[in-house]
Image (cartoon, rainbow, N blue to C red):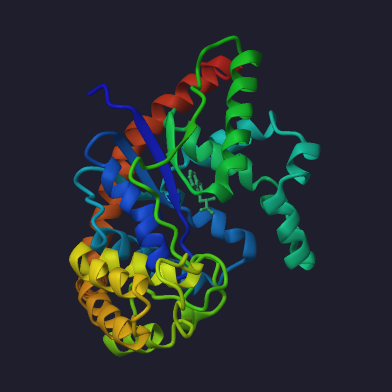
Amino acid sequence: MNKEIVVSGIRSTGYLHLGNYLGAIQNYVEMQNNYDCYFFVADYHSLTTHPDPKALKPNVFRVVAENIASGLDPEKVALYAQSDLPEIPELYLMLNMMAYKGELEKVPTFKDKVRLQPDNVNAGLLTYPVLMAADILIHRAVKVPVGKDQEQHLEMARNFATRFNTRYGAEFFPEPQVWRSNADTVKIMSLDGNGKMSKSENANATIYLSDDDDTIRKKIMKAKTDSGPTEPNSEMPDYIKNLFVLLQVSAGSEVTQTFTDAFNNCNIRYGDMKKQLAESMVSFVGPIREKAAELQRDEQAIRKILKEGAEKARASSAVTIAEARKLIGINYY
Ligand code: TRP
């Protein structure tokens, strides 16, 4: 019962793709056996862009189903919706008193949003890192599995935690640290060779966990290649290396070695490699897609998972909030 506490938030918008799966979700699955894990769907965060009210539930339920289909076990972790923990907005309010306008305005993700949506620069957007800090500190987590793009947010969470501790004279919040898998974190590139798969704006170059077999085949067959190496043991271009990573993940070492040898001997046929990759990727993604679809059809099961997850999470968040109130001086009765 002395496992370290881990928190991570899952975005509720967008479909999960192979980049998420091989990055974030596999980290979660690795952590769930060794840590006290709180994983939640960040539905409050999604409100910054005013999504259609009708879209919220299907998005949240889909994300839950896809994560479970990818190996997250709701028996082992607390899997919940952020909005089911009223203690999060309460701590968010408290932490807002520790967060300064100047530092919030300097956050690169905020500046990006200002550029991308100048007509909707709301306070929720500005205080996004404060809400994220509340998500983490509400369970007094010490480890947070997130990607590079979230490191600055995490640093801010540490600052808010320290300021709270200093102001109220207590070692109350630990400083949460970024957690990275020991296993080489695989970076999956977009199939068109332009940047990360997760950042890809080209849906045709992104393999979603919900893609059907033929869509997967089509996308793989269209992946960027070239006319092949002309000198033995050449360095692989990024987009070719990416196909090898995907082959390794879906087909294993033996098949990958065969094509690596062919590459090194300059007799690789990318058409053949892609055919192989397409088939192994179909076998890899198919079961995840089917399991997620099956779960999504069972709304009641998802509701039960979220309710139980919220109960587990509230056992922890209620304690934190009660103590935080006391430290602040809100204990009148
Ligand atoms: N900001 C994170 C993202 O965009 C999601 C998130 C919200 C999160 N709250 C969090 C991640 C708390 C880790 C911990 O991916």
Residue toward you, 63 or 90: 63
Q: Which of 2 and 269 is in front in this view?
A: 269
Q: Is residue 19 visible?
A: yes
Tell me which corner region of the image, top left, top right, bottom left or bottom right, holds residue 16. Answer: bottom left
Q: Nearer the viewer, residue 59 or 27?
A: 27
Residue sitting nearer the eye, 172 or 159: 159
Residue at 63% in and 59% down:
48
Q: Quadrant of residue 139?
A: top left
The picture places residue 209, in percent across and down from the top left corner, at 33, 72
Where is residue 44 shown, x and y percent of the image? 53, 54
Up/down of 42 relative to 66, above or below: above
The total of numbered circles placed on residues is 0
Residue reaching furthest to the front: 231
The residue shown at (24%, 63%) is: 69
Q: Position of residue 1 (x, y in %)?
A: 22, 24
From this viewpoint, which residue is outermost toward the top? 169
**Residue plotted at (31% across, 69% down):** 260
Residue 299 in sight from this viewpoint: no
Q: Is residue 196 left or right of residue 263?
A: right
Instruction: Tell me where residue 304 appears, x and y as whole percent.
Output: 23, 56
- Answer with left or right where residue 221 lies relative to residue 330: left
The correct choice, above or below, for 314 with respect to 119 in the image is above
The relative height of residue 309 versus residue 219 in the rendered view (above or below) is above
Residue 233 figure quarter: bottom left
